[in-house]
Amino acid sequence: MIALYSIKPIYSDQIINGKKTFELRRRMPANKLDYILIYSSSPVSKIVGFAEVKGVYKNSLAATWRYVSKNVGISKKDYLEYFNGCKDAYAIELGIVKKFIRPFDITELKPDCVPPQSFSYVDQREFKRLIKRKTEIV
């Protein structure tokens, strides 16, 4: 399964630059993730790349922080703020990351596509079409 994620530019840049190897989330899709498509939110507002999903880690806030803190590009204060009200945290472990040479508008995915609040599913045929674009492995 493929999901489109809206990610703040500060964090999408860290993923694209290979410094952030875990993406934190409050909730996850019901099915196993194979890839995430990375939409860098405003002011970039472009699909900038995609990443293979190596696995998903779910545990208490404290245990998740101990496991991923060096690879998420966020302070503990911001981490706790993001997960305020949650008893568990999800961390998506990213494998191979590819950045698009020319990031593109989300409407190229589908004409009526809008950035998701959390995530949205991506049709496998559309994903295969998109990943034929020129990319660089990071």
Image (cartoon, rainbow, N blue to C red):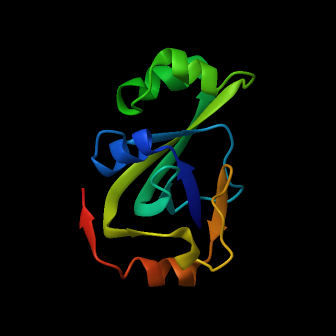
Question: At x 40% / y 77%, what residue is drawn?
Answer: 131
Evaluate whether residue 60 shows in this view: no
Question: At x 58% / y 74%, what residue is drawn?
Answer: 107
Closer to the camera, 47 or 23?
47
| Figure check: 2 above or below 134 | above
Looking at this rendering, what residue extends furthest in the front direction? 43
| On-image quarter of the N terminus | bottom right
Looking at this rendering, what residue extends furthest in the right direction? 85
- Image location of residue 116, percent across then percent down: 66, 56
| Picture quadrant where residue 122 is located | bottom right
- Image location of residue 68, percent across then percent down: 43, 29
Question: At x 24% / y 66%, what residue is drawn?
Answer: 136
Question: At x 62% / y 20%, what residue is drawn?
Answer: 81
Q: Is residue 127 left or right of residue 18?
A: right
| Figure check: 9 above or below 59 | below
- Image location of residue 35, percent across then percent down: 49, 62
Evaluate whether residue 20 shows in this view: yes
Q: How many numbered marks appear? A: 0
| On-image quarter of the C terminus | bottom left
Closer to the camera, 124 or 117?
117
Q: Is residue 51 left or right of residue 81?
A: left
| Figure check: 56 above or below 95 | above
| Figure check: 43 above or below 69 | below
